[in-house]
Amino acid sequence: ARGLADLPPVESDSLLQLIALCNADPRPEKIDVGVGVFRDGEGRTPILKVMKEAERRLLETQESKSYLGSAGDKRFAELLRPILLGEHADDDRIVGVQTPGGCGALRLGFELLATANPSARVLIGTPTWPNHPPLVRAVGLEIAEYPYYERGQGSIRFDAMLDALSKAERGDVALLHGCCHNPTGADLDEPQWRQVRDVVVERGLIPFIDIAYQGFGRGLEEDAFGVRLMLSSCDEVIIAQSCDKNFSVYRDRVGSLFLKTGSPEASARAMAHVFQRAREMWSMPPDHGAASARIILDDPQLRSDWLVELAGMRDRINSVRARLAAADPRLAFIGRQFGMFSMLPLSKEQVLKLREDHAIYMADSGRFNVVGMSDAQIDRFIAAVAEALD
Ligand code: PMP
């Protein structure tokens, strides 16, 4: 008989290992640019003031914690519509549901696709967020890769990307990052989005957009350009959205899944499947974070306070980027990118050496969080990286 003791060892997520290594490093000057959370100039990940206020109101007014059902907080999903969907907010072919973070939305979206078309392939850029492939494999769908980024050049391999997408089969799924690409920071510009859209339409692909950092890049509206463009052009679109970053509620697991089909009837049917899958996995999403975000979005004053705090986070990201880019011509590409991440053209050995010699912790791939370091650590980071690049 086989039991739990017979389970094979697990190759643990290298990023989680990195966090553990950094935590164990006693050097006080250590710089943690591995983990993907926003930090302010003092190196903290504070709770937004507006979130504290919303939580206070929630505490005072919530009268029951009875079940909400698989859809979670419906008003939350409704309030997200104009933010995410823009001019498509009133399209009744687009339906949305609260999920446990962006991860939950991704898993749910892939579950739905695997039910609808088990032979669909999911086209994933290289590199991409390391959790994408396991999320696809978990539902049994096949993965095909498309080239995305040239680390040495600091630029998108756009022709190769288009070429790979244009060879995909009808019904295949193109996984795209809505904005603030993780791990590279290299975002499609508007003309590039239009070209990708043309290929997606021509080949009959389903765009699946992962948007976890809306508001961290060019701006809240600007960051949704790709999402809205695909909605304008395609009958079927899937969007996995996260509020964990832009409301700074990482551990509260706040996200949503939106999908569009060709008709309100087909969308309602798809949503029934979504509820069924959600019921099998987590039954219903956690309430606290989404309820707090809902309170913010439902109140004009809190909403505008949130926009100010969000702009503050975005400004810090972009000002650290500008400072890194100005410091060394070899880092200039960082200033043309968006969101929390960029990738340095360093070998694994060089990354290791930064860890050993300078207590700088970044992923083996050279991905680092541009706002992982405090303001006081920036110069030392630049000097150490410049030395590593020499
Ligand atoms: N997609 C991408 C590209 C991400 O970087 C992340 C978070 N690291 C997520 C989705 C999921 O975010 P969440 O914490 O909301 O599950």
Image: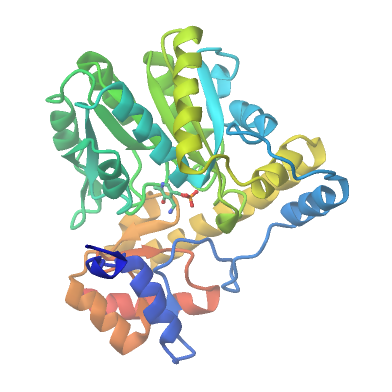
Where residue 281 sits in the image (x, y, percent)? 46, 42
- Residue lying at 35% horizontally and 58% vertically, measured from the top left: 342
Quarter of the image where the N terminus is located: bottom left
Q: How is the image coloured?
A: rainbow
Q: At which x and y percent is residue 163?
A: 13, 30
Question: Is residue 178 in view from this perspective?
Answer: no
Q: Nearer the viewer, residue 19 or 370?
A: 19
Image location (x, y in percent) of residue 232: 43, 15
Residue 250 against residue 44 in the figure, above or below:
above
Instruction: Examine the rendered structure and indicate whether residue 110 appears above or below residue 150.
Output: above
**Residue 216 in the figure: left or right of residue 306:** left
Residue 263 or 22: which is nearer the viewer?
263
Q: Is residue 141 visible?
A: yes
* Residue 53 coordinates in the image, percent (x, y): 80, 53
Q: Compare residues 261 and 204 and report the one nearer the observer.
A: 261
61 relative position to 340: left or right: right
The image quarter containing residue 328 is bottom left
Q: Residue at x 62, y 36 (%)?
A: 72
Q: Quadrant of residue 297?
A: top right
Q: How many marks?
A: 0
For the point 24% across and 16% down, the residue is 204
- Above or below residue 188? Residue 229 is above
Q: Residue furthest front?
A: 1
Does 12 sit left or right of 290 as displayed? left
Please state, as top left, top right, bottom left or bottom right, where the C terminus lies in the image.
bottom left
